[in-house]
Amino acid sequence: MTTYIAFLRGINVSEQKIIKMVELKKMFETIGFKNVRTYIQSGNVVFESASSNSEIICKNTENGLQASLGYKVTVILRTTKEIEDIIKNNPFKTEIKNEDFKLYVTMLSGSPEKAKIKELESIDSTGDEFICKCREIYILCKKGYSDTIFSNNFIEKKLGVRATSRNWNTMNKILAI
């Protein structure tokens, strides 16, 4: 069995697409996953699957959630090993010790084209720093995520892939689960 983390995009945000975590856990169990656990209300689900095909797991999860909820939910999937690598490869290890900065990780549904990454890197980030690494973007915010231009919608439009973001503390706590 492989342990996966499903990051659901856009649920329980601004009073929209409200899903109780108890119900979400049941939905994942109905899809066929084992040892399902949720973390906070923003749609983080840890589970086990006998399948090692992330694409099929992701597609089945999105289809199962849409059947249960009546609307589409974007699911970004990572294994615990991939989360360990995200944490280990943090390019802002020194900066996150400064309480004035907030670190976020935007996880992408796939690897964007190099030309689109270059275009993103050329944008004036108004003081925020970011680094693209394969399927993740590390965003160091001077104020907070609500004040950065690097929202999920912005990144999706620029890179042509789906995206969802979590703060650094959440990433570490999910790994601890």
Image: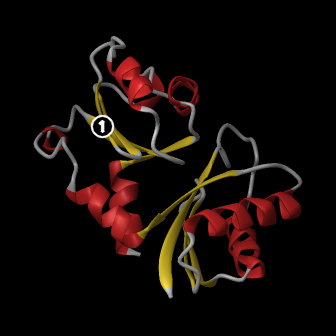
Q: Position of residue 92 (x, y in %)?
A: 18, 41
Extreme-left residue of the structure = 94
Q: Quadrant of residue 84?
A: bottom left
Q: Position of residue 174 (x, y in %)?
A: 41, 66
- In the rendered view, does 24 fall on the left or right side of 113? right
Q: Is residue 85 above or below residue 74?
A: below
Determine the residue positioned at 50% across, 88% down.
1
- In the rendered view, does 37 fall on the left or right side of 130? right
Circle 1 SS class: strand
Q: Colour mode?
A: secondary structure
Please, what is the three-letter code of the amino acid marked with disc 1? Lys
Q: Position of residue 118 (x, y in %)?
A: 35, 22
Q: Position of residue 24 (x, y in %)?
A: 71, 68
Determine the residue positioned at 43% across, 22% down.
147
Determine the residue positioned at 36% across, 45% down.
134
132 or 68, which lies in front?
132
Q: Is residue 49 above or below residue 130?
A: below
User: Residue at label 1?
Assistant: 102
Viewport quadrant of the C terminus: bottom left
87 or 132, which lies in front?
132
Q: Quadrant of residue 37?
A: bottom right
Determine the residue positioned at 58% across, 86% down.
50
Neighbourhood count class around disc 1 (C-alpha, 10 Å): few under 14, some 14–19, many 20 upward: many
